[in-house]
Amino acid sequence: MAGVDLGALADYLAVISLAQIDPELDPGSYDTILSLFSPGANPPPGLTDWDRAFLRGLYAAEQTDEASNARIGNVANTMADEIRAQQQGRRDAE
C-alpha cells in the first residue's frame, strides 16, 4: 500500500464496508474509488459522484422490498437521479 493516499484509502474502505462489497470486485470502467487497487487503473483521489450516488441509492432503497430485483431497481433509479442532479448543478454553475 506504499504510495496510497490516506484519504483515498479511507474513502475506499468506507465504500467497501458501507456497501459490503467484495474487495476483489473489478469496478470496470466506472469512475469510482473502488478502482484504487485495480491493476493499471488511474483511481480518483477520493469519492466520486458515482460512489456518492451508489451509496445514496443503496441506503435510500426500500429496506422492506422482498425482491432483490426491486431493490436493485431502486438503487439504480436513485443513482441516475443523483448523477443527473450533480451534472445539472455543474451546468448551472458554468
Image (cartoon, helix red, strand yellow):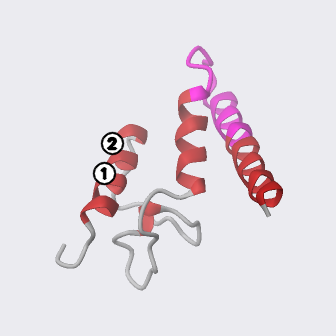
Q: Give the percent coordinates (x, y) of residue 64.
A: 59, 14
Q: Confirm or deny contact between disc 1 and disc 2 (CB under 8 A).
A: yes
- Say which amino acid is labelled 1: Leu
- Say which amino acid is labelled 2: Ser
The residue under label 1 is: 13
Q: Which residues are magenta?
A: 60-78
Q: Residue at x 75, y 56 (%)?
A: 87
Q: Give the percent coordinates (x, y) of residue 9.
A: 29, 60
For mark 1, give the secondary structure.
helix
The residue under label 2 is: 17
Answer left or right for 11 relative to 78: left
For mark 2, give the secondary structure.
helix
Work out how far the residue at label 1 is from the one at label 2, CA to CA, in angstroms. Answer: 6 Å
Answer left or right for 50 relative to 34: right
Instruction: Quarter of the image for the N terminus: give it.
Output: bottom left
Viewer-closest of 17 and 7: 7
**Label 2: how many Cα within 10 Å (few below 14, some 14–19, many 20+):** few
Q: Residue at x 53, y 58 (%)?
A: 48
Q: Give the percent coordinates (x, y) of residue 72.
A: 64, 37
Viewer-closest of 73 and 67: 73
Q: Residue at x 82, y 55 (%)?
A: 92
Residue 74 magenta-highlighted: yes
Q: Residue at x 44, y 62 (%)?
A: 33
- Looking at the rendering, which quadrant does residue 73 occupy? top right
Answer left or right for 38 relative to 31: left
Can you say whether 82 is above or below 43 in the image?
Answer: above
- Looking at the rendering, which quadrant does residue 30 occupy? bottom right
Give the residue furthest to the front. 93
Q: Which mark is residue 25?
A: none
**Label 1: how many Cα within 10 Å (few below 14, some 14–19, many 20+):** some
What secondary structure is the magenta-colored segment mainly?
helix
Instruction: Quarter of the image for the C terminus: give it.
Output: bottom right
